[in-house]
Image (cartoon, rainbow, N blue to C red):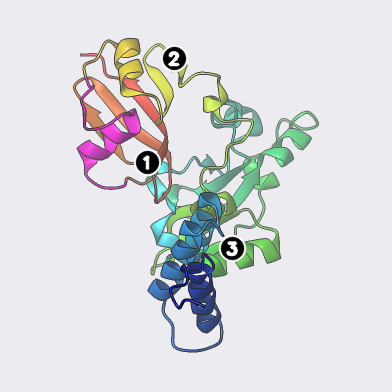
Amino acid sequence: MSDDQPPSTTAPRKRWVEKLSQIFSGEPEDLDDLLEVLREAKENHVLDTEALTMIEGVLQVSQMRVRDIMIPRVQMVVVPKDAELETIFPLVIEFCHSRYPVIDGDRSKIVGVLLAKDLLAHVLQNKNLTVEDLMRPACVVPESKRLNILLKELRTNGNHMAIVVDEYGQAAGLVTIEDVLEEIVGEIEDEHDDHEDEGYIFQRSSNEYMIKALIPIDEFDEYFSTHLTTDEYDTIGGFILSQLEHMPKKGESLVVDNMRFEIVRADNRRVHLVKLKIINN
């Protein structure tokens, strides 16, 4: 029999399986080695792209801290503790959040959290109640807490929101369980998101729009009579990244001509949703 046997088609798979076994056997390892094996598994069609992305997200979350994804204090939607329930209806209707930090004086002093379901349950019975009467205790975490530990604590305690405090005990921002999960699985949409509309563009007022970042740049140009199209990018998300030259976080903004773009949703991989405001000259 000839020694010139054709190479086995199972050889590549065997190699990466052996690598994976070594990594989980307690032998010397690091994160880069693990990622290399997982990416090789994807190339060998053992993992699909979504599975690999989620695993990478899980590994990244274990390295990130609350400060990396929190919503900054200045961008929090808050309610005063002494406000009567009727007076906060316009704010609750506009933002459609399920939870609102309750402040005492200014945003650095968070004294509780108001749940929208508590508001709805009591407002018809007694409109003279104040926010302080209904607020619940706030879950407080330091900026330095690791995201994987935060996720475990939120799940264990049944909390969906945590107030982030700095070294002086003042509120620095907030983080939700959804924010953490989106670092793993990508954007999570719900029934209150304006961008559930069929198209890429949802007009909120005469000069304000919610725009999906995946809108083709030529469609954006046609809708807004602009001239942003080039060969460098295909979407408005790509345009924003080219202008900022880094992956933006939620709340970051960019002004181009008479347009102000604000990042509404983004993860460590791409921009998802943008708010556009046309600035009147």
For the point 62% across and 67% down, the residue is 152
Say what secondary structure mark 1 lies in.
loop
The quarter in which the C terminus is drawn is: top left
- Name the kind of residue labelled 3 in the image: Leu
Q: Residues within 10 Å of mark 1 (few under 14, many from 20)?
A: some
Can residue 110 be seen here? The reply is: no
- Rounded to the nearest angstrom, the CA distance separating label 3 from label 2 is 36 Å
Pick whichever, 93 or 181, lies toward us.
181
Pick whichever, 162 or 259, lies toward us.
259
Say what secondary structure mark 2 lies in.
strand
- Please tell me in which quadrant of the rendered image residue 90 appears: top right
Which of discs 3 and 2 lies nearer the camera? The answer is 3
Q: Is residue 165 left or right of residue 252?
A: right
Residue 251 — which label? 1
Q: What residue is shown with label 3?
A: 151
Can residue 215 be seen here? The reply is: yes
Q: Which residues are magenta?
A: 228-247
Is 51 covered by the magenta stretch? no
Residue 205 — which label? 2
- Rounded to the nearest angstrom, the CA distance separating label 2 from label 1 is 20 Å
Pick whichever, 210 or 229, lies toward us.
229
Q: Position of residue 124 (x, y in %)?
A: 78, 28
Q: Position of residue 53 (x, y in %)?
A: 49, 54
Q: Residues within 10 Å of mark 2 (few under 14, many from 20)?
A: few
User: Measured along the vertical axis of the image, is residue 162 above or below residue 76?
Assistant: below
